[in-house]
Amino acid sequence: MHDGDRQSGHERVPSRQRTRFPGISSRAYEHPADRSALVALRKLSGFDQVFKALSGLLPERSLRLLFLSDSVRVSERQFGHLHDMLLDACYILDLPKVPPMYVTQDPQPNAMCIGLDEPIIVISTGLVELLDEEEMRAVVGHEVGHALSGHSVYRTVLLFLTNLAIKVAWIPLGNLAIMAIIAALREWFRKSELSADRAGLLVGQDVRASMRGLMKIAGGNHLHEMNVDAFLEQAEEYDSGGDLRDSVLKILNVLPRSHPFTTVRASELKKWAESRDYQRIMDGHYPRRDDDKDAKVSDSFRESAASYASDVKDSKDPLMKLVSDLAGGAGDLGGRVKRGFDGFKTPPPAKGGPAPAAE
C-alpha cells in the first residue's frame, strides 16, 4: 500500500472471486423486523389511500430527468470503477435489470435507492471520496439490496411526504396525519437498512470492509486513527449502559432518524455475519425468488415474533430487561421501575438482608 493511500484512509485491495447467489430471494437476507414493520406500515389507517394517491402524483419522470441533467451517470466511460461494482453486485444477487446509478455533488456521505416504477441509485461525492474500493463495494451491494427488496418505492414516498410535511406544517390536522405516516415509514426504513447492510455483505463478502465503511461514516476519513474492535465496543456500551432514563432517551433520539445509529448497524451486521443463517447462504442454501409466491405471511410473522423475543431476552438494555422480566412473571414491578429511574442496575434487596448502601 502506498503511503498516500494509508494516510488518506483508503486501501487498494485486488479483485477476487466472489460467491454468486442465482435466483436468491430478498427473504434470504431481510431482517425479520424489516418485514414485520412493512406489514404493520401497510395496515396503518389511511396508508393505502395515501400510497395510491401518491403513486399517481409523484413526479417520477421529473426525478429521473433531474438526476440525468444535474448529476453524473455511472457508466463504462464515467466512474468506471463504480460501474464495475454495480454490475458485480447485480450479478452476485442476480438482479435481472441493472438500475441506473448517478453520482451527485454533495459533501455529505450518502447513498439512496429511489423510484416507483424502476429504482435509481444515487451516491454522493462525499461517499465516493470517503470509502476505499471494498468499502464502496459493500455500499453498492447495500443499494442493490434495497432495489431487490422493492424498498425504493417506500423510500420515495417517505422523501415526498417529508417535503410535503414542511409545506403543510401550518395545517394542524393535515400535518398530524402526514407525520403519523412519516413516523411509521421511518420506523420501517430503519429496519430496512439492517436488511440492506446484509445484502451489502453478501455482495462484498468482506465483513471487515463493511465495518470500516460504517466506522468512516461515523468518524470520517481517519482510518489510521480508528479501530473496528473499539468501534464495536461502543455499540456494546450503548446497548447495555445506563438506566431506564437512558433507555427512553435512546428511543427519543432515534425517532426522527431514517437510519439506525452506525454503531448499532455495525453490531447487528457482525452478529449476522457470525450466524448460521449467513453461512448457509454462503454455502448455497437460501430461499429462491421462484418460491416467493408460496411464502406465507404467517411464517414472516412467526419469524419476526421469534426475532423480537430473542432480542428482548438477550438485550442488556435496562428497559428490555424489565420487559423480559415482566414477560417471565418477575414481581416487584413498582420497585423495579422506581429503581430504574434511580439507577436500574442496583439489584433489589434480598428478604431479610441489609439494604444496599446509597450511591
Image (cartoon, rainbow, N blue to C red):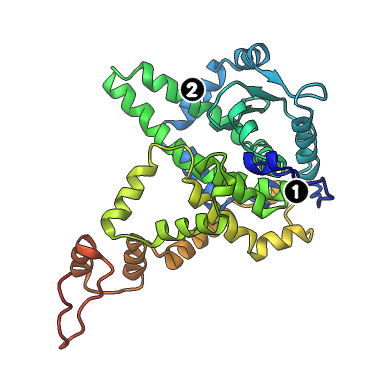
Tell me residue 270's x, y (percent). Answer: 59, 58
Which residue is at the front of the view, 71 or 176? 71
Q: Within 10 angstroms of label 2, few (less than 14), some, or many (20 or more) residues?
A: some
User: What residue sits right under mark 1 in the picture?
Assistant: 24
Residue at x 67%, y 41% (from the top left corner):
10
Which residue is at the front of the view, 42 or 284? 284
The residue type indicated by label 1 comes to: Ile
Query: Where does the C terminus fall, quadrant-wise?
Result: bottom left
In this view, 202 is above or below 105? below
Left or right? Give the position of 198 relative to 322. right
Which residue is at the front of the view, 245 or 49? 245
**Do residues under tags 2 and 1 come within 8 Å of each other at their CB atoms?**
no
Instruction: Give the quarter of the image for residue 276.
Output: bottom right
Left or right? Give the position of 194 relative to 273. left
Residue 160: mark in rendering:
2
Which residue is at the front of the view, 321 or 179? 321
Residue at x 33%, y 63% (from the top left corner):
318
Tell me residue 341's x, y (percent). Answer: 21, 60
The residue type indicated by label 2 comes to: Phe
